[in-house]
Image: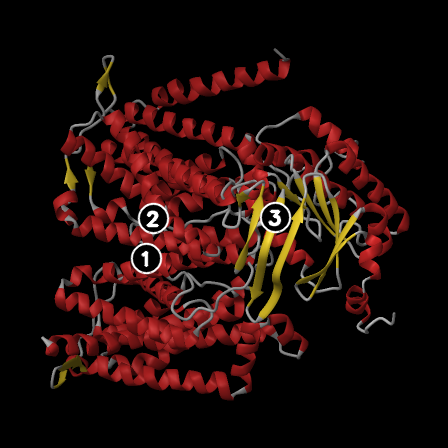
């Protein structure tokens, strides 16, 4: 469903992504890992359309979206969250979802809105001010709900577990699994917590210095010498 | 219906009666005051359009005179050279003004202050074009004997009261449109865009298009007021039609009356314009608008939300105008 | 034909040098405070009227009015700075409105004090024509061309060789880093306003010496200065010089080959072209990200 073909992104002299090719199927749950600065968020930005690509293509359901602006890709079915939650200021939680529904999905569905709030655990926070009255966990939940409100077929989650303590992480991971199960969409998750990712995702891809260096089951990927070297900086001994 | 809704409708009816019947009756003899009020309403309409662009579009303009003049000339020329009926020409004036805003679109990608000044530059450009394109606009000589409003159902709308009714109706129509847009989903999205444009784009909002729409709407409203003014005073020349006063007075009016409210810009316009014309001008025939400049500076420093909201004790919100 | 072009180019360079003084002041203040002083053109106007007053009331050559103009305009600049620095929130927007209000006050103040009549210098010495070959100019134009070169050289020296100037550049490029290094941004901002006032004072006397002045000139000079900064691109000081010369030359070429009425339009069209085609200006740094 999602086809990334030889994607390259450069910022001035820095090559953030170097010829990355990746395929994500319609209902896959894929983890995306890699050391800091590997280009994970840049890859998301390139898929979602918030950053310009110098080479390569992004194809979604056979359609080439490479030149389409971010808002068009969101309407097309690519939802994404930001590493640092970006709620829509000056709006309530419910309004955040309403805007996402109206402009991302095409129509407002109050019942679906309530279900979404319940799904992410914000059922009683509908009228809270998104910018000032939410805790970090709630902000992250809103971030996910906002993306889901656009009825995406592909959901890109950028370090949605970061900053949460162990209990929060487990709860969130369970929520993500539930989302994947119930809504039957493709999800790509950027995460640093290898344990959680391995437990959650049947497939993991690894980026390092803008290149894809591994792609497979968590067990095979984390035993891969190149992957170990990228994290520890030393070649692994067999 | 609920009691609250009933009360509101009752108030609206009373207000309507006062505005449409009471005011003309009370001012029947005083044509001078009546024409002042019509001018104040004209400025109020522009002030509303300016505030709409700022509140919804997040864009501050220092060149709304550009749209005023374009609307004025477009309407006058359509009637004089192509024989259009005035009602259509006035609307067309607004449309042409909105189209001229297309030229301003590249300035949208400039940061805030740059956009504000870019529109100012456009006002200068349009003024010069109007002065030099003599074949179309008769240049500095101006257009005289612009057709007045017609007699409809036996009533002569070219009269001062007729002009008052038209201006009042236009302004109230604008308020209605502003209100509906603000309450719609577009209004919600626009509000979100002010602080979180990236987030709105990530959920499918075409923020650039929405901003452009607000620019067109604001330009349309201002152009209509310009067209109205052309047929009301029956004379146009470039320095008048594109005068900086059509930019300055609405800005002071909108901020004075309460930039963020629906009626604030209009009430502000009436107060500011009448006081300026009746009081300051009497004391200083030339240069009396120095007081308005001082007022604007003082408001920005001490009460960016406007003075009237302060008096009616509305809760203070964001501290910029 | 070549003579005409050369003459027009020369004339454009002369005018452009004064435009540069005006635009540099605007750019300096914008660099340090990120504020566009909409009253800047009116500061120039103020200096022009000071020169007029000195000439008409005291009968002295406008050049001698320069020290007076400097004092008056720098004082006005300091007052403007004091007011602008009082704005705490949404400075970008509120300062625009504030300086707009100040501009309205200054323009109308000029109207009040000096009426709407057009004024220009009566000094024959300044108006004397100086000609060599195809290059025709008024003595005042030549004089102020030299003055502006000296001033710009001085400004360059100040910005690159003195601590104060370097502090200005530091604050312009990274305010927080500058603060961390012990530079007081407020004093730097004040300095930039004063220097802008200084440049405006000279420009104002220049405009009075070889042009005509009336209260509406303030606004039109601000617009011209703004057009030049857009031409130059944000944050580029050498660009301002080039932009100013470009504007001056465009105007004089238009006057020579079309009509003087169209010269203002020519500058505006240049502005539009840059806006549509080169939004970062001729020298503007490409902004990465937002």
Q: Which mark is residue A3?
A: 3
The residue that disc 2 covers is B103
Q: CA distance from mark 3 to mark 1?
A: 41 Å
Task: Say yes or no: labels 3 and 2 on the same chain.
Answer: no
Looking at the rendered structure, the secondary structure element under dot 3 is strand
Q: Which of the numbered marks, if any, corresponds to residue C159?
A: none
Task: State whether residue B28 is above or below residue B310.
Answer: above
Which quadrant of the rendered structure holds the N terminus of chain B?
top right
Q: Residue at x 23, y 76 (%)?
A: C209
* Residue A101 position within the rendered picture, expressed as x and y whole percent measured from the top left: 62, 33
Q: Estimate how packed mark 2 is, as few (under 14), some (14 to 19) or many (20 or more) residues with alpha carbons within 10 Å.
A: few
Residue C172 % position (x, y):
54, 72
**Could you confirm whether marks 2 and 1 are on the same chain?**
no
Q: How many residues crowd mark 3 within 10 Å: few (<14), some (14–19), many (20+)?
A: some
Tell me if label 2 and label 1 are in contact, CB under 8 Å. Answer: yes
Q: Quadrant of residue A142?
A: top right
Q: Are marks 3 and 2 in contact (CB under 8 Å)?
A: no
Chain assignment, label 1: C
Distance from disc 3 to disc 2, alpha carbons, whole Å, reads 39 Å
Element carrying mark 2 = helix
Residue in front for this viewpoint, C244 or C101: C244
Which label lies toward us, 3 or 2? Answer: 3
Q: CA distance from mark 2 to mark 1?
A: 9 Å
Of all residues, the one furthest to the front in this rendering is A238
Q: Residue furthest right?
A: A167
Tell me residue C282's x, y (percent): 38, 69
B197 relative position to A159: left or right? left
Q: In the image, which disc is placed on residue C272? A: 1
Mark 1 closeness class: few <14, some 14–19, many ≥20 residues within 10 Å? many
Chain ID of residue with mark 3: A
Report if residue C112 is visible in the image: no
């Amino acid at each position: 469903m999602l086809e990334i073909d030889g994607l390259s992104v450069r910022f001035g002299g820095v090559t953030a992504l170097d010829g990355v090719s990746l395929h994500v199927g319609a209902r896959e749950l894929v983890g995306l890992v890699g050391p800091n600065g590997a280009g994970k968020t840049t890859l998301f930005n390139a898929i979602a359309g918030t950053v310009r690509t110098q080479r390569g293509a992004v194809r979604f359901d056979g359609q080439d979206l490479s030149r389409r602006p971010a808002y068009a890709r969101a309407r097309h079915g690519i939802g994404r969250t930001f590493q640092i939650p970006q709620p829509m200021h000056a709006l309530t939680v419910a309004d955040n979802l309403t805007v996402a529904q109206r402009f991302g999905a095409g129509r407002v569905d109050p019942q679906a809105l309530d279900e979404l709030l319940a799904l992410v655990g914000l059922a009683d926070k509908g009228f809270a001010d998104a910018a000032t009255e939410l805790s970090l966990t709630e902000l992250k939940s809103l971030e996910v709900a906002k993306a889901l409100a656009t009825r995406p077929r592909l959901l890109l989650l950028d370090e949605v577990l970061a900053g949460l303590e162990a209990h929060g992480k487990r709860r969130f991971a369970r929520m993500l699994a539930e989302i994947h199960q119930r809504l039957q969409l493709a999800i790509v998750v950027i995460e640093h917590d290898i344990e959680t990712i391995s437990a959650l995702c049947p497939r993991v891809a690894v980026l390092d210095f803008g290149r894809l260096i591994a792609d497979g089951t968590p067990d095979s990927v984390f035993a891969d010498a190149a992957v170990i070297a990228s994290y520890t900086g030393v070649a692994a001994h067999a | 219906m609920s009691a609250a809704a009933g009360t509101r409708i009752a108030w609206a009816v009373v207000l309507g009666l006062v505005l449409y019947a009471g005011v003309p009756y009370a001012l029947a003899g005083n044509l001078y005051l009546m024409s002042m009020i019509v001018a104040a309403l004209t400025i109020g309409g522009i002030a509303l359009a300016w505030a709409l662009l700022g509140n919804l579009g997040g864009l501050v303009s220092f060149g709304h005179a550009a749209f005023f003049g374009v609307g004025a000339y477009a309407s006058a020329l359509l009637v004089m050279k192509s024989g259009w009926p005035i009602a259509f020409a006035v609307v067309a004036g607004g449309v042409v003004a909105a189209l001229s805003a297309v030229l301003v679109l590249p300035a949208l990608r400039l940061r805030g202050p740059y956009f504000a000044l870019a529109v100012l530059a456009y006002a200068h450009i349009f003024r010069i074009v109007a002065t030099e394109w003599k074949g179309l606009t008769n240049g500095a000589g101006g257009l005289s004997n612009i057709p007045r409003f017609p007699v409809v159902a036996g009533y002569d709308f070219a009269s001062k009261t007729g002009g008052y009714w038209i201006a009042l109706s236009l302004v109230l129509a604008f308020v209605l449109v502003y209100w509906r847009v603000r309450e719609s989903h577009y209004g919600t999205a626009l509000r979100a865009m002010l602080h979180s444009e990236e987030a709105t784009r990530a959920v499918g909002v075409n923020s650039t298009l929405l901003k452009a729409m607000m620019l067109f709407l604001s330009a349309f409203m201002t152009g209509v007021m310009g067209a109205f003014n052309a047929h009301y005073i029956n004379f146009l020349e470039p320095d008048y039609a594109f005068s900086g006063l059509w930019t300055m007075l609405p800005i002071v009016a909108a901020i004075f009356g309460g930039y963020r409210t629906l009626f604030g810009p209009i009430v502000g316009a009436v107060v500011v314009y009448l006081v300026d014309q009746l009081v300051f001008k009497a004391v200083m025939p030339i240069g009396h608008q120095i007081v308005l400049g001082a007022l604007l500076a003082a408001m920005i420093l001490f009460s960016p939300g406007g003075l009237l909201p302060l008096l009616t004790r509305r809760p203070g919100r964001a501290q910029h105008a | 034909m070549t003579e005409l072009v050369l003459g027009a180019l020369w004339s454009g360079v002369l005018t452009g040098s004064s435009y540069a003084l005006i635009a540099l002041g605007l750019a300096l203040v914008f660099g340090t405070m990120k504020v566009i002083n909409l009253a800047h053109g009116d500061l120039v106007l103020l200096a022009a009227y000071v020169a007029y007053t000195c000439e008409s009331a005291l009968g002295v050559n406008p050049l001698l009015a320069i020290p007076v103009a400097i004092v008056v305009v720098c004082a006005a600049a300091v007052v403007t700075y004091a007011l602008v620095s009082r704005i705490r929130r949404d400075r970008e927007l509120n300062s625009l409105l504030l300086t707009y209000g100040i501009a309205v006050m200054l323009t109308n103040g000029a109207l009040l004090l000096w009426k709407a009549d057009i004024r220009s210098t009566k000094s024959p010495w300044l108006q004397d024509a100086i000609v060599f070959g195809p290059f025709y100019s008024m003595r005042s134009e030549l004089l102020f061309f030299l003055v502006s070169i000296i001033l710009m050289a001085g400004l360059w020296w100040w910005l690159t060789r003195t601590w104060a100037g370097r502090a200005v550049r530091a604050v312009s490029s990274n305010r927080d880093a500058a603060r961390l290094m012990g530079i007081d941004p407020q004093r730097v901002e004040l300095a930039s306003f004063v220097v802008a006032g200084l440049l405006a004072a000279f420009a104002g006397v220049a405009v009075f010496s070889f042009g005509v002045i009336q209260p509406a000139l303030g606004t039109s000079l601000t617009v011209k200065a703004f057009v030049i900064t857009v031409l130059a691109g944000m944050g580029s000081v050498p660009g301002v010089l080039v932009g100013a010369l470009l504007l001056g030359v465009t105007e004089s070429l238009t006057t020579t080959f079309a009509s003087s009425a169209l010269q203002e339009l020519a500058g505006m069209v240049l502005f539009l072209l840059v806006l549509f085609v080169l939004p970062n200006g001729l020298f503007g740094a490409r902004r990465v990200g937002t």
